[in-house]
Image (cartoon, rainbow, N blue to C red):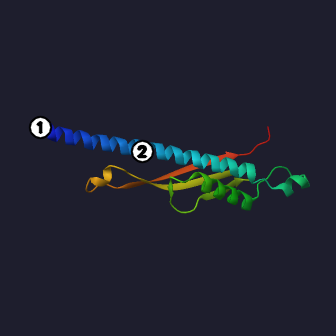
Amino acid sequence: MLMPAAVLVLIMLAGIAFDYSHLYLAKRDLASLADSAANNAVTHGVDQASIRRGDGYALDPDLVQRSVVASIAVHSRDLHLVGEPEVEMLTPTQVRVTLVARIDFVFTKAVPGVRDSETVRVTSVADARAN
């Protein structure tokens, strides 16, 4: 009589473990996406006019924003992003990208009273320096 109850408990624990590992991997994918978007921003967001004038390396805010949006559009097929990415120019050569995504659970949706998704916020900073 205890065996069916034990199997049910084991299945529920396995489902919870699966969902939390899924959450961890999705958060890691989101962090990787934020890193690549920030790196693309400092690479493709260079203000060419500033370099031609001899003012040095600087970023164009419009190019930075467009490169982040383009980077996310290409890479975020499986992630459910919440809102637009937050792009901040910290210095003339430094960009911070913040992404928020909703990660849906797979198995714990079936458990009453338990959340069926988690919201994750990830921030990445990239700095373009001449070495």
Residue at (85% x, 50% y) in the render: 56
Label pair 2/1, CB-CB below 8 angstroms:
no
Q: Position of residue 20 (x, y in %)?
A: 38, 44
Q: Which amino acid does label 1 sit on?
A: Leu
Return the x and y of residue 123 as percentages of the image width and height: 57, 50
Whichever of callouts 2 and 1 sits on the residue coming sooner in the sequence is: 1
Mark 2: secondary structure: helix
Left or right, residue 98 beside residue 57: left
Residue 21 image offset from top left, x and y in percent: 40, 41
From this viewpoint, which residue is outermost toward the right? 53
Which of the numbered marks, if any, corresponds to residue 22?
2
Q: Find the distance from the CA under tag 2 to the CA under tag 1.
A: 30 Å
Q: Is residue 21 left or right of residue 68?
A: left
Residue type indicated by callout 2? His
Query: Along the line of sight, which residue is nearer the eye, 56 or 7?
Result: 7
Quarter-of-image position of residue 48:
bottom right
| Residue identified by numbered label 1 | 2
Helix, strand, or loop for circle 1?
A: helix
Q: Callout 2: few (<14), some (14-19), or many (20+) C-alpha neighbours within 10 Å?
A: some
- Taking the spot 72% from the left edge, 50% from the top edge, the residue there is 42
Residue 93 visible in the current orientation = no
The answer to whether 48 appears left or right of 79 in the picture is right
**Residue 126 in sight:** yes
Q: Residue furthest left?
A: 1
In this rendering, would 61 be left or right of 32? right
Where does the image place residue 78, in percent across and percent down from the top left?
A: 50, 52
